[in-house]
Image (cartoon, rainbow, N blue to C red):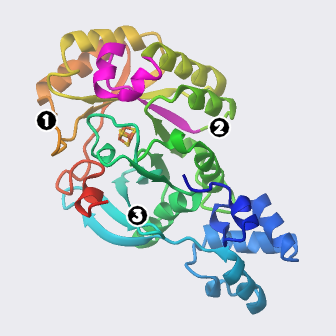
Amino acid sequence: MHNTNPIITEQMSEPADIKSMTKPELTAFLARLGEKPFRAGQIFKWLHQRQVRSFEEMTDISKDLRNVLQKTAQLTVIKSVEVQISKQDGTRKYLFALPDGHMIESVLMKYKHGNSVCISSQAGCRMACRFCASAIGGLVRSLHPSEMLEQIYRIGQDIGERISNVVVMGTGEPLDNYDNLLRFLELLSDEHGLHISQRSITVSTCGLVPQIRALADRKLQITLALSLHAPSQEKRLLLMPVAAKYDLAQVMEACDYYFATTGRRMTFEYSLVHGVNDTEEDAEQLCALLGNKNCHVNLIPVNPVRERSFRQPDMNTTMRFKNKLEKNKINVTIRREMGRDIDGACGQLRKKYGH
Ligand code: SF4
């Protein structure tokens, strides 16, 4: 696991990852270089509003300081390797190379209400969900806050438009990279950065109970989405190995705690897999599980994964499932599949490059 704290990195005399530093951390870092606090404000804007790729572009900073930064700090930039653009709906799928050469994916979705970016929080993932292409190679490493931000910055620059929504739902389990995720959220919503409202940010988890509770205690205004995918512990275990560590009852209690503590309505993600979790009985069990909760359910006809034999249910089955939930007064949406004509399920593009 890489070092997550830019200040520690700095003490170890490696270049400090200044794009991962919060404003107070950046101020302290510059103070040690003999600089006044207002410099931190200037540099923070260059990093997070103008999103420059080099210190030379920071034109209101003296040449001497830029030279010092060149030696003591690292300006993390990721590189676009491939972009696939859907002819159907304009969805763009990006393959980015991290500074150490590992590959990650991000997706831009264009909606009427604005541009939404789905980012990766790790290269690979160790949660091993059965329906997920990202799980196949296991975890490579967690991403730094700067590498999470960069996905949004580079996509915004590529399309020349503002990004209004961010979902942390790409490769990786964000709560398995908890400290970096919190720092990322702080930087993303900072008024001197991209200033994305916390209410426009969704974080998705497969159900790491201690971290859900810890996140609740931070009382952020983000939306938490639980990847539920099964209405019972028995079925969830078949799809998600994490269920062996935290059973469904524990996970649902943690979700209740999240709602009670933050006042934010939970979203439950449910991938419909033909013959696995799409029956009448599954719908009934799901109603019993969620019936008394103030929540939203996203039904997602599963993306076929080449290496697995999972298939999507047909439209009738999907609609029957949805209607059953609605009859039980559960808010439900069928998640429109974006970019069906470009490289399939999350994780497929990255796999094509052998990463
Ligand atoms: S679905 Fe998410 S948590 Fe599960 S293996 Fe894939 S990336 Fe990891």
Residue 149 is at least partly visible in this image: yes
Secondary structure state at the residue bearing disc 1: loop
The residue lying at 26 percent from left, 49 percent from top is 338
In this view, the residue farthest toward the bottom is: 63
Query: Which amino acid lies under the numbered mark 2 shown in the image of this protein?
Result: Leu
Q: Which mark is residue 309?
A: 1
Disc 3 within 8 angstroms of ligand 1 (CB): no
The residue lying at 78 percent from left, 70 percent from top is 40
Position of residue 201 measured from the top left corner of the image (x, y, whole percent): 52, 45
Secondary structure state at the residue bearing disc 3: loop
Identify the residue position indicated by label 3 in the image.
102
Per the rendered image, the range of residues in magenta is 222-247
The residue lying at 71 percent from left, 88 percent from top is 67
Residue 246 painted magenta: yes
Identify the residue position indicated by label 2 in the image.
220
Residue 232 is at least partly visible in this image: no
Q: CA distance from mark 2 to mark 3?
A: 31 Å
